[in-house]
């Protein structure tokens, strides 16, 4: 049986004292998913002098942080952005897969075309919608769905199939089951990358400095190439010492340390973390990624998961 949701214990990182040494602090507050694939986008924000405080929660819990004003931006499921036409993407970075995603999968006891009941992961939003879109578009299947806790055995006890995301989705048992990698099936269907999560914020120019800070994080961790015009920022939101091509000294070391830290946290071998973060996941939102997001919006609308679809997406 699917159990009721247990209380999720949120981790709050100590608030930083300043943004740049010697400059008056301006604090931003963000919320993030607690998964491995988010580490390149948040890890340096945990530093006491980052200028940003971070709170962690599963995707379905993050919108409340933004709505209550407890966060200026949230790293949240892309479907949440698509359902909020007055919001903006805060920075040109996100969680993206171009082929396989490995950590978002559908597990079925029967062939996909015969699925009649589907257990949805209570922690998910985007993946639940994507799984149903893929079943309809590829197999003409519209299963009866139930939202359940992230417990593969319990989910499959009462359903033909289930969706699991994050680290559980990566490590769940697959023996004897039909397994769909939602990232790979999306790319096979559309030819586009899939945007799993974006930084969502109010569409407010005052948050542009936060967007620039968020864009710098995967550059500083070595997972995104720097933009030629990138500059350091002051706490007041202005530009400080322009570094031309962002100073990359130490990025390689931070990347290695992040991989080692993630390996310790998850008990994954370092080789597994490296392969996942470096070869499976991507963190830039360029033109191809935005086209993928638009295709997802259009299919979500066509299948009744969105009330409308936009022609353009605002990005701070």
Image (cartoon, rainbow, N blue to C red):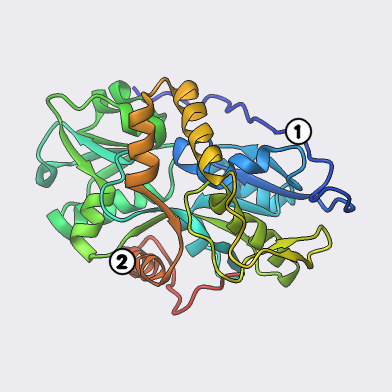
Which quadrant is the C terminus positioned in? bottom right
Q: Residue 77 at what x, y percent from top left?
A: 48, 51
In the depicted view, which residue is nearer to us: 20 or 136?
Answer: 20
Which quadrant is the N terminus positioned in? top left
Callout 1: SS: loop
User: Which residue is located at x 44 percent, y 25 percent?
Assistant: 263
Q: Which residue is mark 1?
A: 14
Residue 101 vertical position relative to residue 246 in the rendered view, above or below: above
Q: Which mark is residue 288?
A: none
User: Which residue is located at x 40 percent, y 72 percent?
Assistant: 287
Q: Which residue is mark 2?
A: 299
In the depicted view, which residue is nearer to us: 116 or 25?
Answer: 25
Q: Residue 32 at what x, y percent from top left?
A: 58, 43
Q: Residue 44 at what x, y percent from top left?
A: 63, 42
Residue 98 vertical position relative to residue 297 in the rendered view, above or below: above
In the depicted view, which residue is nearer to us: 31 or 132?
Answer: 31
Earlier residue among tags 1 and 2: 1
Residue 148 appearing in the image: no
How would you rate the neighbour count of disc 1 (Cα within 10 Å): few for under 14, some for 14-19, many for 20 or more? Answer: few
Q: Quadrant of residue 229?
A: bottom right
Q: Are marks 1 and 2 in contact (CB under 8 Å)?
A: no
Quote the CA–CA distance across marks 1 and 2: 41 Å
Q: Is residue 180 left or right of residue 52?
A: left
Callout 2: SS: helix
Q: Is residue 247 left or right of residue 172?
A: right
Q: Is residue 129 left or right of residue 78?
A: left
- Counting every numbered tag in the picture gives 2
User: Which residue is located at x 48 percent, y 59 percent?
Assistant: 225
Residue 159 appearing in the image: yes
């Amino acid at each position: 049986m699917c159990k009721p949701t247990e209380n999720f214990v949120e981790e709050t990182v100590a608030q930083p004292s300043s943004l740049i040494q010697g400059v008056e602090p301006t604090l931003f507050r963000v919320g993030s998913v607690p998964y491995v694939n988010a580490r390149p986008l948040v890890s340096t924000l945990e530093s006491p002098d980052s200028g940003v405080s971070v709170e962690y929660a599963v995707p379905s819990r993050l919108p409340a942080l933004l709505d209550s004003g407890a966060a200026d931006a949230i790293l949240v499921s892309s479907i949440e952005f698509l359902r909020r036409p007055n919001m903006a993407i805060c920075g040109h970075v996100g969680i993206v897969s171009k082929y396989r995603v490995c950590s978002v999968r559908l597990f079925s006891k029967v062939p996909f075309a015969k699925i009649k009941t589907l257990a949805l992961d209570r922690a998910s939003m985007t993946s639940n919608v994507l799984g149903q879109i893929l079943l309809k578009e590829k197999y003409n299947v519209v299963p009866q769905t139930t939202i359940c806790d992230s417990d593969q055995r319990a989910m499959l006890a009462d359903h033909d199939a289930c969706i699991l995301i994050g680290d559980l989705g990566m490590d769940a048992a697959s023996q004897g089951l039909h397994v769909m990698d939602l990232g790979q099936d999306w790319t096979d269907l559309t030819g586009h990358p899939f945007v799993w999560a974006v930084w969502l914020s109010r569409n407010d120019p005052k948050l542009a400095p936060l967007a620039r800070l968020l864009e710098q994080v995967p550059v500083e961790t070595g997972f995104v190439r720097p933009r030629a015009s990138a500059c350091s920022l002051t706490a007041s939101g202005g530009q400080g010492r322009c570094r031309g091509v962002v100073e990359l000294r130490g990025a390689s070391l931070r990347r290695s340390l992040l991989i080692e830290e993630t390996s310790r946290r998850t008990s994954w071998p370092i080789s597994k973390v490296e392969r996942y973060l470096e070869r499976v996941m991507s963190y830039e939102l360029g033109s191809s990624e935005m086209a993928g997001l638009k295709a997802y919006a259009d299919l979500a609308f066509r299948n009744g998961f969105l009330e409308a679809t936009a022609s353009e997406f605002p990005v701070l």
